[in-house]
Image (cartoon, rainbow, N blue to C red):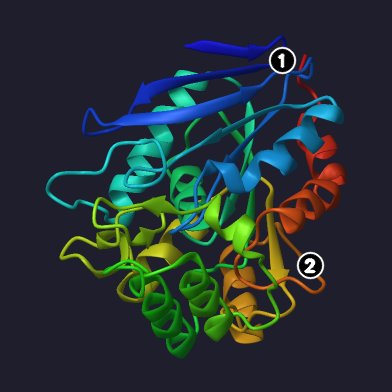
Amino acid sequence: MTAVDDTTRRGLWFGAAGNRLAWEAYEAASPLSVVFAHGGGQTGRAWRRAARRVQAAGFAALTFDKRGHGQSDWIANGDYRLDAFKEDLNQVLRAWGRPSVIVGASLGGLTALMSAADGVPEIRGIVVIDTAPQLNAVEILRLVEFLSGSEQGFASVEAAVAHLARYFPARVVSPAAMESNLTRLPNGRYTWPWDVRVVNGELNSVALPHEEMLHACARRVSVPYLLIRSSESVLVTDAAVARLAECVPQLEVLTLAGADHLVGGDDGARVAEMIGPFLARCAVGLT
């Protein structure tokens, strides 16, 4: 473990397979903390601004890189099933050891749902960003195509920017900003810092075949549950929300205006602002 400053620490914990998981902790006084779980193809870095926002509001925060992402270990046998990600999250929560609200985007939201269904005692509430047990199949396939597009790497930073623009035309990213999120391969090509087998390997995390299992998980969630929909995404339909509400009577739903599925960066900071009242309610009774 290393201290970055008086309120931030970095270190490594171990996941369910003995895999190293890199984390960053943002300390604050509140007994309730916020654990941010990023989506597939992202890293904990996507939630740094959000972590700083909730820290400034008095809540400790934790971000971490999932298996196969960022500074965390890639898995030799390619085990990136939802259960594996869920078990890693459970390990992180045990190591963190604090009452927490889990804020999870996409893949991170599904694992938050599954961990809450397990009754992990540290979980006091979940905030799930633009994902649900029932997902738009066409959009899932489009996202898998987008994420798989980095498998051979990109010839240049500009090529990576163009690839993003093809799938998310409203998202404007400068080459400099893109380069900071890329890894240079030994052959000179660029790729994102994650294992593409997460979506296209034999043991991948793509959620379409798991709809019934995820609805069964939702029926077991007893903690407060907030779904934030991204207004520019079609991944979660009205029908999906209605079915989720049948499983989760305590479900609350908000919409993040102008956001696409890749919630992070500035949108992540907006998420931190939106969840303030939810965090306050989850903190009631903690000392």
x 70%, y 80%: residue = 170
Q: Which residue is identified by label 2?
A: 256
x 39%, y 73%: residue = 211
Disc 1 secondary structure class: loop
Q: Nearer the viewer, mark 1 or mark 2?
A: 1
Which one is earlier in the sequence, the residue at label 1 or at label 2?
Answer: 1
Q: In the rendered view, would you say 69 is above or below 233?
A: above
Q: Is residue 134 visible?
A: no
Query: As shown in the figure, which amino acid type bears the numbered disc 1?
Result: Thr
What percent of the width, then of the height, locates residue 128?
62, 57
Q: Which mark is residue 49?
A: none
| Residue furthest out toward the left | 77
What percent of the width, then of the height, locates residue 132?
54, 68
x 46%, y 47%: residue = 117
Q: Which residue is identified by label 1?
A: 7
Query: As shown in the figure, which amino acid type bears the numbered disc 2?
Result: Leu
Q: Is residue 195 left or right of residue 173?
A: left
Q: Is residue 5 left or right of residue 111?
A: right
Residue 29, picture quadrant: top right
